[in-house]
Image (cartoon, helix red, strand yellow):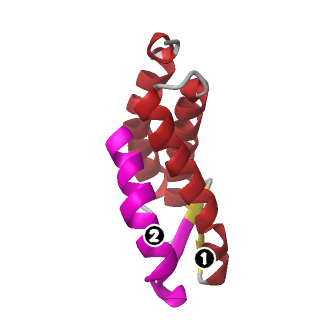
Amino acid sequence: MWLFCLYMACVYLPFDMFLKPVADDREVWFGVALSGWWAKATEPLHWIIYALGAWGFWRMHRWMWPWAALYTAQIAIGMLVWNVLDPRGRGWLGGVLVAAIFMVPTAALWRAKPLFEG
């Protein structure tokens, strides 16, 4: 999780913000896909989330629990919503399957409270 957040904060999101053309930009929030300028406008929020995640996992800060688990749960719900609402999605079954996969790290992060207590 730390490496993923670090990659997103230090490699992918700077590329996404500064090099990716606005016409190609996509951001997903709670399963709703944004594109163009709406996506570009919300990228800093993703950047902040992943930067805080990288810092929080690196130091195993107390505030990471329950926030890391809740954010991962939001991704799972978002995957379900996206698969149902977006024409490129796989429908209910695909959404449930992908959401179930994301619930594995969600449950692991939820159960990891002692690791974040110092």
Q: In the rendered image of this protein, does residue 66 appear above or below residue 72?
A: above
Range shown magenta: 1-27
Which kind of residue does numbered mark 2 sit on?
Pro
Quarter of image, res 70: top right
The residue depicted at 39 percent of the width and 65 percent of the height is 12
- Mark 1: few, some, or many residues within 10 Å (few <14, many ≥20)? many
The residue depicted at 66 percent of the width and 74 percent of the height is 41
Quarter of image, res 34: bottom right
Q: Nearer the viewer, mark 1 or mark 2?
A: 2
Disc 1 on helix, strand or loop?
Answer: helix
Q: Residue furthest left?
A: 3
Quadrant in which the N terminus is drawn: top left
Quarter of image, res 37: bottom right
Q: Nearer the viewer, residue 112 or 32?
A: 112
Which kind of residue does numbered mark 1 sit on?
Lys
21 within the magenta span:
yes
Q: Position of residue 103 (x, y in %)?
A: 44, 33
Q: CA distance from mark 1 to mark 2?
A: 12 Å
Q: Position of residue 66 (x, y in %)?
A: 59, 25
Q: In the rendered image of this protein, does residue 26 appear above or below residue 55?
A: below
- Is residue 57 visible in the rendered image? The answer is yes
The residue depicted at 49 percent of the width and 58 percent of the height is 83
Q: Position of residue 105 (x, y in %)?
A: 40, 31
- Is residue 80 visible in the rendered image? The answer is no
Q: Which residue is mark 2?
A: 14
Q: Nearer the viewer, residue 35 or 88?
A: 35
Contact (Cβ within 8 Å) of mark 1 with mark 2? no
Q: Which residue is mark 1?
A: 40
